[in-house]
Structures are given as structure tokens and as C-alpha cells.
Amino acid sequence: MLIKKFMTHDKKEAYHPVDADEIVKVSCFTHIFEDKTKIHICGLDFFVKRKEKIAILGPSGSGKTTLLKHLLGLLDPQEGVIWVFGVNPSKDFEQIRSRIGFVGQNVDEQIIASSVFEDICFSPLNYGIPRDETERLAYEIMDVLKITHLKDKAPHYLSGGEKRKVALAGALVLKPRLLILDEPFSGLDTMSKNELVGIINYFNDHYGTAVILTSHDVDIVPEIADFIYLLKAGGEISKRGKPGDIFADADKLAKYRLEPPILSKFFLALKKKMPKIQIPLTIEEAEREIENIIKK
């Protein structure tokens, strides 16, 4: 893809793509923390287009959360390019904040109001949206996430899954163009994970919300991701591909300290005896493949 390069006001290079669908661009950046820890994320360029759902996988310490913090403007790289909706987020996040929703690993840090309803209303009111319109939006998102019955509850007393839904409601209340999630399935039971996947896919389908998420839960990733980026320990972005391509190579995944989803592992073992079978990623695909095997 052709890239038009220009210099920002702070003399750091940034990129504006000719492809207007590209909303995120990251190219080889370095960040040095106060304790002198140096994170260098390089290799393949990281990019996200409108409506895409992207999963970032890699071992602990590979820089996944650091990458997300740069996209949110919470960290400013010493070198490299971070571009989100046409601006450097560490310098101009105010211009784009209403277009981005975020849920971090520790949702307790994000839920700050005394009730669920007021917490969901916080961001719209902070952006200057009138109270009546804010309340309409809050009721709308609570209905979608099926948490209206929690509206008067104190967040402190909610379960872990309920808290994550409340945080997600606050992130989605303005129907953002980009949703960023850091380990969103951590600590959730199977039913809560499936509900969360359904919510994310609903917003992607109905509002075109692009999604970037990190996860160690490889079994759920095929249900949600269009593309996967693999990060090695040390921060090298060395692979981008569709879930079917990424999870079909167990040996390569092992280099990233990852294993394929359980379904993929099972069918990869079968493939050694039945080379022509396809590797499914979901229960539905597995059912169809088993039916094909029986028919043959």
C-alpha cells in the first residue's frame, strides 16, 4: 500500500495512508520507562482498517499492553511512528477520544461512579452531551448488554463478569469507531466469555466498530478475530494472518510460547492420519468436518 509520509510538529515521522480505511498505523517504535526498561516493538508494521477485528497474541513481556497504551496516548514513544485516526495520540488524543472505547485488564480502575447508571453516563457528560441525550444513550447500551437491572447497583458489589459488562457499556455508550480491549476474557467463566464475544461482534456488525484486543485465551480468539498479530518475547511483530493460517502451524506457535486452540490441536493430530481433513476453528466448523469424514 502506498504511504504518504510527513513530519509532525514535534519532528517525529507519522503516516497518513492513501487507503482511507486504515485507522491505525504503528511502525517500529521504542519506549523507555522511568526505571530504564526499554521496550522496542518492531518487525512488521501494525495496521488496522475500519471494521477489522484484530487479536494480538504473544508471551508475557512481549509488549502487548505497551502497544495498546501507545495507541491510547498514555505513553509517548522516544522513536517510531504511532498513528491513530490521523493524529499522534500522545499529542492530540483530545481530538479522537470520543471515537475510541477502552476496557483494561483491571476494570475496577475504570468504574469510578457510585452507581452503574452514573458510571455509564460519565463519559458522555464529560464530552458535553446534554443530560437527557446521555441518559437515552445509557439506557440504550444497558439494554443491548442486558444490564438494565443493574443500573442502581453500586459497582463495588457486582461480580467480575458484571463489572466487565459495566466497563464495556461505558466504553461502547458512544458507539466508538475503535474498541481497544486488554485481556478482556481474563477471569470470566465460559458463559460470560461467550456473552462478551457476542457483544463485541454485535457492535462490529451493526456499527462497524473496529476491535483491537490482546488475549492469552487462544480458544476464544477464532470466534472474534479477523486477523492475528504474533509478538515474540522482546517485542518483535513477526506474523500477521487469519486465524486459520496462524493456528494451523503448531510448531511456529510454539516459538511464541503459544498453543493452538483445543479444537485445532485435536484435528491437527487427526490430520497426521487423515491428511485431507480441514482444520476447524469453531464447534460449527468441527461438526461439518466430522460430517464430511463420516460421509466418506
Image (cartoon, rainbow, N blue to C red):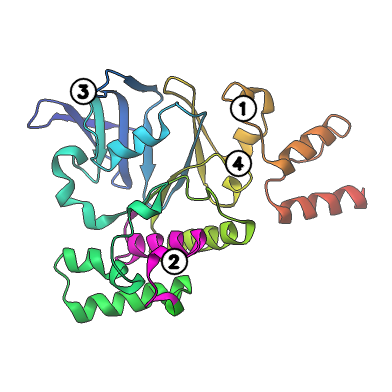
Please state which amino acid type lies under the numbered disc 2. Tyr
Give residue 253's mark.
Answer: 1
Q: Is residue 17 visible?
A: no
Compute the Cα span from label 2 to label 3: 41 Å
Image disc number at residue 47: none
Alpha carbon distance from label 3 to label 1: 31 Å
Query: Which sits earlier in the primary sequence, circle 1 or circle 4?
Result: 4
Residue type indicated by callout 1: Leu
Q: Position of residue 265 (x, y in %)?
A: 74, 36
Q: Which badge, 3 or 4, is on the more N-terminal residue?
A: 3
State the image coordinates of residue 135 (x, y, percent, origin top left).
27, 78
Residue 275 falls in image quadrant:
top right
For disc 2, the marked residue is: 157
Left or right, 21 with reference to 92: right
- Give the class, few, some or many, for how many residues have Cα within 10 Å of label 4's Cα (few <14, many ≥20): some
Span colored in magenta: 150-178
128 and 54: which is toward the camera: 128
Tell me what residue is drawn at x 24 percent, y 39 percent: 74
Between disc 2 and disc 4, the foreground one is 2
> Would you say the residues marked 2 and 4 are in contact, meaning their CB atoms lie under 8 Å apart?
no
Q: Are marks 3 and 1 in contact (CB under 8 Å)?
A: no
Whether 23 is drawn above or below 208: the answer is above
Mark 4 lies on a secondary structure that is: loop
**Residue 68 percent across, percent down from the top left:** 35, 39
Rendered position, 43 above or below 124: above
Q: Which residue is mark 3?
A: 78
Q: Residue furthest front?
A: 157
Q: 42 or 161: nearer the eye?
A: 161
Q: Secondary structure at mark 3?
A: loop
Q: Secondary structure at mark 2?
A: helix
Which numbered disc covers residue 218?
4
Say whether disc 3 or disc 1 marks the residue closer to the N-terminus: 3
